[in-house]
Amino acid sequence: MYEIKNHPLIGRDLKELDQSIRILVFKKLLKLQSSPEIGLPLGNKNNLDLTGMYKVYVAKKKVRIVYEILGGELIVHIIAIGKREEMEVYRKAFYRREEDS
């Protein structure tokens, strides 16, 4: 079982979502905890290097969870949660990883 570790701004991401979608996000996070490999790998999206990150869909692909697997520590690090519109969630993930580096 993997530990879920959230980026400090995940709380803000969740507040932007409707309560019904938040419930779906939490259910998906529970699945990620036991099977993080269910996500699809990300690469370069609109000149944002997201190599090493994964995405999973929530709410019929309206919302994405972007995360990375820290294998040596069995940790799933949730980096961003949000909508794909105008690459919003991917930009959040890119800049948050840059800040953490």
Image (spheres, rainbow, N blue to C red):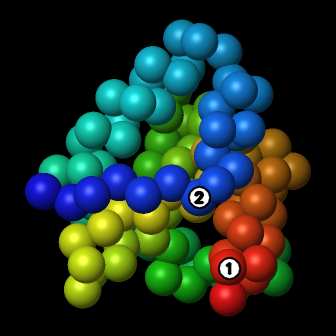
Above or below — where is 57 with respect to 73?
above
Decide: is 98 above or below 20. Answer: below
* 35 to 24, vertically: above or below: below
In the picture as drawn, the residue positioned furthest to the front comes out as 8
Q: What element carries label 1?
A: helix
Q: Toward which corner of the image does residue 79 lie, by quadrant?
A: bottom right
Residue visible at 33% across and 29% down? 27
Residue 64 is situated, as x and y percent measured from the top left of the image, at 57, 45
Marks 2 & 1, CB-CB < 8 Å contact = yes
Residue 91 vertical position relative to residue 46 in the rendered view, above or below:
above
**Which amino acid does the dot numbered 2 rest on?**
His
Q: Element type at marker 2?
A: loop
Q: Classify residue 81 by image quadrant.
A: top right
Q: Return the x and y of residue 19 as percentages of the image width and height.
A: 59, 12
Count how many numbered circles sit on residues in the image.
Answer: 2
Q: Residue tagged by mark 2?
A: 7
What whole-number distance in Å separates the C-alpha atoms at marks 2 and 1?
Answer: 9 Å
Q: Is residue 88 left or right of residue 24?
A: right
Residue 14 seen in the current view: yes
Q: Which residue is drawn at 36% across and 73% down?
A: 69
Q: How crowded is mark 2: few (under 14 residues within 10 Å), some or many (20 or more)?
A: some
Instruction: Locate the C terminus and report the quarter of the image it occupies.
Output: bottom right
Q: What residue did someone put label 1 on? A: 100
Three-letter amino acid code at the position of disc 1: Asp
Disc nearer the start of the sequence (2/1): 2
Question: Quick one: label 1, few (<14), some, or many (20+) residues within 10 Å?
Answer: few
Give the position of the N terminus as an image quadrant: bottom left
Q: Position of residue 56 (x, y in %)?
A: 45, 50
Point out the residue furthest to the top here. Answer: 20
| Apparent side of residue 86 relative to residue 94 in the rendered image (left or right) | right
